[in-house]
Amino acid sequence: MKSTNKPDKETYEIWRNDPKNWKLGIFYFNKLDRRIFPPKRMQGMGWTVNFANPLSILSLVGLVIAIIALATIFQTN
């Protein structure tokens, strides 16, 4: 597989099922996977963050900041 080619579905499944790509069993870390939010280890359970992708970390931080900002704006006294 060349780095310029998009991996096929089978490759994505191999990465998702490989225990080496999961730190502590819950944190997905795969430098070869360029997706920001890959599916969780258990199918149908949503998505996780690829901590090997810097854009994923920025997206997660942005999401947390947005949630805190919204909670602050809509806070009732």
Image (spheres, grey):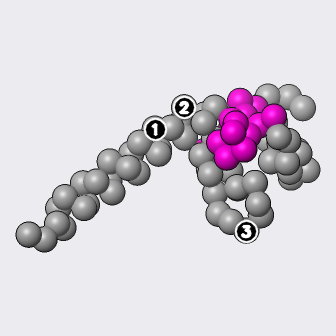
Q: Nearer the viewer, residue 22 or 44?
A: 22
* Label 3 neighbour load within 10 Å: few <14, some 14-19, many 20+: few
Looking at marks 1 and 3 on the same chain, the residue that comes earlier in the sequence is marked by 3
Quadrant the C terminus occupies: bottom left
Residue occupying image coordinates x 33% and y 57%: 67
* Label 2 neighbour load within 10 Å: few <14, some 14-19, many 20+: few
Residue occupying image coordinates x 70% and y 56%: 39
> Which residue corresponds to mark 2?
54
> Which residue corresponds to mark 1?
58
Tell which tag, 1 or 3, sits nearer the viewer. 3
Q: What residue type is labelled 1?
A: Leu
Chief secondary structure of the magenta span? Answer: loop
Please indicate whether residue 46 sits to the left or right of residue 21 in the image: left
Marker count (numbered) = 3
Q: Which amino acid does label 2 sit on?
A: Pro
Q: Quadrant of residue 4?
A: top right
- Considering only vertical position in the picture, is 62 above or below 20? below
* Label 1 neighbour load within 10 Å: few <14, some 14-19, many 20+: few
Tell me which segment is drawn in magenta. 20-36
* Cβ–Cβ under 8 Å for marks 2 and 1: yes
* Residue furthest bottom in the image: 76
Percent x, y of residue 33: 73, 38
> Which residue corresponds to mark 3?
44
- Considering only vertical position in the picture, is 12 above or below 57? below
Residue 59 visible from this viewpoint: yes
Q: Quadrant of residue 21?
A: top right
Percent x, y of residue 73: 17, 61
